[in-house]
Amino acid sequence: MKTCKLGTVVFFGAALVATGAAAQEYDAAMGDEDRNLLSRYGLSVSAGGGVAGFTDESMRDTADVGGTWGVRAALGTRSPIAIEAGYVGSAQAVDALGLDRDAVLLGTAVEGLARVNLLPAERINPYFFGGAAWSRYDIVNAETNTSDISDSDNLLEIPVGAGVSYRIAAFVADVRGEFRVATGEDLVRTDVGEDAPTLHRWSASARLGYEF
């Protein structure tokens, strides 16, 4: 938890520095293409997918690297600071004693992010982000479950990461890497006094969107 707090402080500190530098140049760099947007700050919707997995060793042994998919909306794609809202889904094959061989760990998350655009007026825009997400995991495709894995789990996640977007006319291509810090997880049942495996996750994804 101390690491999470330190990471949050570092993120917002860097965000303030980057915002101050980018804001000074944004209005001067804004061209005719930007002024024709529905919002001068930029509004986009996008969809895509990627891969994700757990960082904890015992969870890596239990759940394979799986696929992710999602949709999101962003306000501020042409400004130093953007706000994103999104849905993220995931599916991972699960292997545990007492669980059906075809069982799948299905993840569902809704999230809100603050994004710092380093070059908001340019065609290529690197950025970094952080926020909060509510997530739920469910075991599906399992007729029986006598394993130490619960049928479902709700938890809070803190997603942080970086990426880069590329504008092609009104379309925006985007790739990003992400680390999600999990809190309050109890997906894996443990004996009294034993720590449950963490559900921290990494992911890499690509998306294609349209900018208004």
Image (spheres, grey):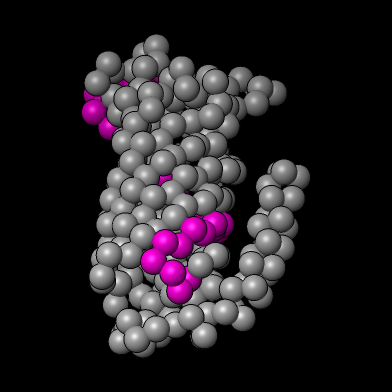
Taking the spot 53% from the left edge, 43% from the top edge, the residue there is 179
Question: Quick check: 79 left or right of 142?
Answer: right
Name the foreground residue: 127 vs 64.
127
Q: Quadrant of the N terminus?
A: top right
* Percent of width and height locating residue 130: 56, 57
- Total marks placed: 0
Q: Position of residue 5 (x, y in %)?
A: 72, 51
- Determine which quarter of the picture holds residue 146: top left
Residue with the most extreme top position:
97
Q: Position of residue 14 (x, y in %)?
A: 68, 61
Quarter of the figure with the C terminus: bottom left
Q: Is residue 70 above or below residue 200?
A: below
Indicate left or right for 209 with 111 as reference.
left
Question: Could you tell whether 116 is left or right of 140 in the image?
Answer: right
Residue shown at 53%/44% (left/top)? Answer: 180
Q: Main secondary structure of the magenta part?
A: strand
**Front residue (pair 35, 204):** 35
Residue 155 seen anywhere in this rendered image of the structure: no
Q: Is residue 192 left or right of residue 111?
A: right
The one nearer the camera, 207 or 95, is 207
- Residue at 33% from the left image edge and 48% from the top image edge: 206
The range drawn in magenta is 120-147
Measured from the top left, where is residue 204 in percent x and y? 41, 41
As for residue 127 lying within the magenta part, the answer is yes
Asked whether residue 55 is in view, the answer is yes
Please tell me whether residue 182 belongs to the stretch shown in magenta: no
Q: Residue at x 49, y 76 (%)?
A: 79
Q: Is residue 205 above or below residue 123?
A: above
Q: Judge whether 161 appears above or below 21 on screen.
A: above
Rendering quarter of residue 128: bottom right
